Image: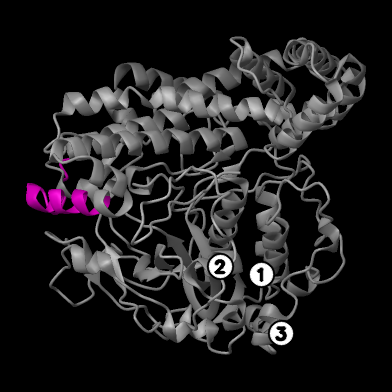
Amino acid sequence: MWMPFLRRRITSPILKLFSSSSGVKSTITTMAGLESLNFDNLALRALPVDPIKENYTRQVPNAIFSLVEPSPVKNPKVVAYSIDALKLLDIKEEECKRKDFAQYFSGNVILPGARPAAHCYCGHQFGYFSGQLGDGATMYLGEIVNKKGERWELQFKGAGKTPYSRGSDGRKVLRSSIREFLCSEVNHNLGIPTTRAGTCVTSDSRVTRDLFYTGNNIQERCTIITRIAPTFIRFGSFEIFKGVDNQTGRKGPSTGKTDLLLQLTNYVIENFYPEIWAANSGQEAKVLNFYKEVVRRTAILVARWQCFGFCHGVLNTDNMSIVGLTIDYGPYGYMDRYDPNFICNSSDDGGRYTYAKQPEICRWNCGKLAEQLAPMVPLNKLREVLEEFDGHFDQEYMRLMRQKFGLFKSQPEDKKLVEDFMEAMYKTGADFTNCFRALSKFHSEDDVRPVVEYLLNQCCSAMEYKAAFAPTMDPRQLEMLMMLSQQNPDLLAMLGKQAGALERELELASRAGDMKDLDNEKKRKNDVKAWTEWLSSYNQRLKAEFAGQNTDEMRKQRVEVMDATNPRIVLRNFIAQNAIDAAEKGDYSEVRRVLRAFQKPFDATVKYEDLTGFDSAVEGAQGGDVQQLDEDAHRNNPTDKTDEAPSCSTATDHCHIVYDQRPSGAKKIKVS
């Protein structure tokens, strides 16, 4: 497997972000207590800090950080923690059972040595420069150097207002916090480079939220997660120096401060790319090679997203890590039915961040970073480097795809084999994860019939297929908007509509007409044909792969590689939502159970129905809080039908959902 983290040693060279982990010890012999964590807050010493100490919304020029303090919450309670993530900080599990553990990780009590601060950055959001953004709901707590010499930045998310909160309350709620907490750890265990999540702590403090901006306000619990990464500096961190944008008229708060740009750039290279820092003497060479590595890591990151069916949802420049990690989990989604136009963010009306567009958008974001580095390196040289993005992406994508298909040799026809597989999934409405997992069951033409039968069970029904491709606009509305797009495209953009969205609607309308007479019998016949034809091509490719070799030995190796690359489970929306529904009624056991299940997402021997939460690890520290939380939830939200929903701590159908089964054609879960 791959190392999904950049690990910086203070006294030794940095470990490669995507290198093998075989040489890294996984056992930590000495752990620290919460009062003796080894904080060494280098970022605040090395980069300028805002001299204004008052915490109010403002533009923050000439600074990278602003000092802040977390806002206390009432009665904090531990929802879950990831001991694997906390071990990075030298925190042992016994510390997680302390009565005051929730106090420390809610921000009510500051960890000794921590110095909370908020980071200033800008960003292009949905393609437009938005000016200053910054840590409006997150806080840098400090950097902890562990016993192995690795430096890790610790963050709170949801701990209250900062100068960058822009009128919001700086809080996060239980549902969104659970989603980020779980997916951070899930992606790590899948081998996707990501920030980590150490704890999820909720409280009896509440904030008002309108989930889908429909006017239906609800009261939700303030919840705080801790995030861990080498750094949370991002592409948008370099955009605080941007001049006036031609489209929006906005500019960065530190525009023109090239000395500060140089200071930030050198800090990032020296501390997170020390090999580049040591190998290059000139400033231009350092920055150019730094940019090359950022482009490479970003291309590899998005290639892995594509191979696992992960869609980020909000790939703005402020959500792009400078060290190539997945950061800022919002309305993400793992695909169920394969659809290249899959949109996981209900706010993405224009379809800018569809699954298929992710590589293109990440490349575009790298281009925006190049523009900010131009004062130090000629832009034409940076753009030459950007041309390497596609090559890095293709190399990593096909490397992983060959593993997913059980192919050890590279052949020219492999790309078409992959494309045809994707097309078969698309035409049949088949489940992305389970179809890949099924490939290890196929070895020869003798397996065609049983594998086709399995794949047919992963295909959606005719009714589901029609619903998936049903137009979302009334025909009269579409006709009016198409007319407007030709006569006044600027007005169309002001209405929040984009040409791409209209083209997609036209395509959906055309497909709806073609599928008018489709029923289950016709669809099954089409599906059998599509999968039989593809398996025939796959069989021919396998024959060429294993010609003249020990078939039994190669089959064994092939299955091992495939089952270690094609996950048995991914964090589907219904799995996360099931855990959220229980947690919002005061039962956190399903959150912990999901976390436990995804510690081994590839393992076929895990029996999910036998998994429990953390046993006494958290419950022992909670005492009687869970029942009290149930009562509070019912009292404060009397419309919640708490008594009608079974607890996930009991053996009910509601609780023991099947993690490795595709969801039924039930109502789609909206995420925003």
Give the mark nearer the N terminus: 1 vs 2: 2
Image coords of residue 556 (percent x, y): 81, 31
577 over 105 or under it: above or below:
above
Point 66% across, 15% down: residue: 417
Few, some or many C-alpha atoms within 10 Å of disc 2 (few <14, some 14-19, many ≥20)?
Answer: many
User: For this rendering, which residue is in front, 499 or 274?
Assistant: 274
Q: What residue would you read off at disc 1?
A: 583
Residue type beneath disc 3: Gln
Q: What residue would you read off at disc 2?
A: 174
Residue type beneath disc 2: Leu
Image coords of residue 583 (percent x, y): 66, 69
Point 26% across, 64% down: residue: 43
The dot on residue 311 is: none
Query: What is the C-alpha distance between the residues marked 1 and 3?
Result: 12 Å
User: For this rendering, which residue is in front, 220 or 656?
Assistant: 656
Which element is circle 2 on?
Answer: helix
617 over 174 or under it: above or below:
below
Q: What residue would you read off at disc 3?
A: 627
Query: What is the C-alpha distance between the residues marked 2 and 3?
Result: 17 Å
Give the mark nearer the N terminus: 2 vs 3: 2
Can the viewer see residue 609? yes
Give the image quarter of residue 621.
bottom right
Query: What is the C-alpha distance between the residues marked 1 and 2?
Result: 8 Å
Is residue 372 in the magenta section? no
Residue type beneath disc 1: Ala
Which element is circle 3 on?
Answer: helix
Check whether the beta carbons of the residues at disc 1 and disc 2 lie within 8 A of each other.
yes
Which element is circle 1 on?
Answer: helix
Image coords of residue 369 (percent x, y): 26, 38
> Could you tell whether 448 is left or right of 316 in the image?
right
Image coords of residue 257 (percent x, y): 8, 50
Q: Which residues are magenta?
A: 248-268
